[in-house]
């Protein structure tokens, strides 16, 4: 599964989201947008949100950091990651 995360350098929520993905031992592509308007617009076009981080699993919008942690608390994140391995 392709995991992408749009981030900015000095962003607490981005760090938090990445920490969770690292804890899950999954590889992800980090797209650092900072002042890159093109990448920012790409992110907004893909999910309609303007804050970072924004996470995508196989092009599907998963959400921001809080969303990721909610999925984890519900046990759904592990299910998504494990089922992707067995696809
Ligand atoms: N609830 C969101 C909060 C994300 C958030 O507030 N991110 C800040 C940066 S740490 C942001 O994007 N602010 C608007 C901006 O930088 O343009 C989440 O968990 O992802």
Image: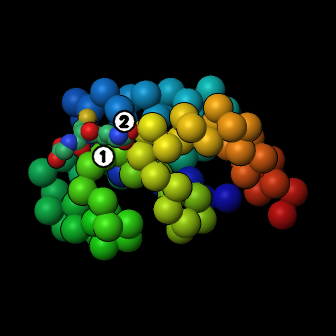
Label 1 crowd (10 A; few <14 / some 14-19 / many >=20): many
Q: Position of residue 56 (x, y in %)?
A: 51, 58
Taking the image as four quarters, which one is ligand 1 found in?
Answer: top left
Residue ID at (32%, 67%): 48
Q: Secondary structure at mark 1?
A: loop
Q: In the image as oriented, which residue stretches furthest toward the bottom?
A: 45
Residue ID at (38%, 29%): 15
Residue ID at (81%, 54%): 83
Q: Secondary structure at mark 2?
A: helix
Q: Is mark 2 within 8 Å of ligand 1?
A: yes
Q: Is residue 11 above or below residue 37?
A: above
Q: Quadrant of the N terminus?
A: bottom right
Quarter residue 60 falls in: bottom right
Q: For this rendering, which residue is in front, 56 or 64?
A: 64
Q: Position of residue 27 (x, y in %)?
A: 60, 43
Residue 39 is at least partly visible in this image: no
Left or right: residue 87 compared with residue 61: right
Q: Is mark 1 within 8 Å of ligand 1?
A: yes
Q: For this rendering, which residue is in front, 77 or 27?
A: 77
Q: In the image as oriented, which residue stretches furthest toward the right?
A: 86
Quarter residue 66 falls in: top left
Which residue lies under the disc numbered 1?
A: 52
Q: Name which of mark 1 and mark 2 comes first in the sequence.
A: 2
Q: How many numbered marks, from 0 up?
A: 2
Q: Is mark 1 in CB contact (under 8 Å) with mark 2?
A: yes
Which residue lies under the disc numbered 2?
A: 14
Left or right: residue 74 compared with residue 3: right
The circle drawn on residue 41 is none
Residue 14 is at least partly visible in this image: yes
Q: Position of residue 64 (x, y in %)?
A: 42, 46
Residue ID at (36%, 45%): 53
Q: Quadrant of the C terminus?
A: bottom right
């Amino acid at each position: 599964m392709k995991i992408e995360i749009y981030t900015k350098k000095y962003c607490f929520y981005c760090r938090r989201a990445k920490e969770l993905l690292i804890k899950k031992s999954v590889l992800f592509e980090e797209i650092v947008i900072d002042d890159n308007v093109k990448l920012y617009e790409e992110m907004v076009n893909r999910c309609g949100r303007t804050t970072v981080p924004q996470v995508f699993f196989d092009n599907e919008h998963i959400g921001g950091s809080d969303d990721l942690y909610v999925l984890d608390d519900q046990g759904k994140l592990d299910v998504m990651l494990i089922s992707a391995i067995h696809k």
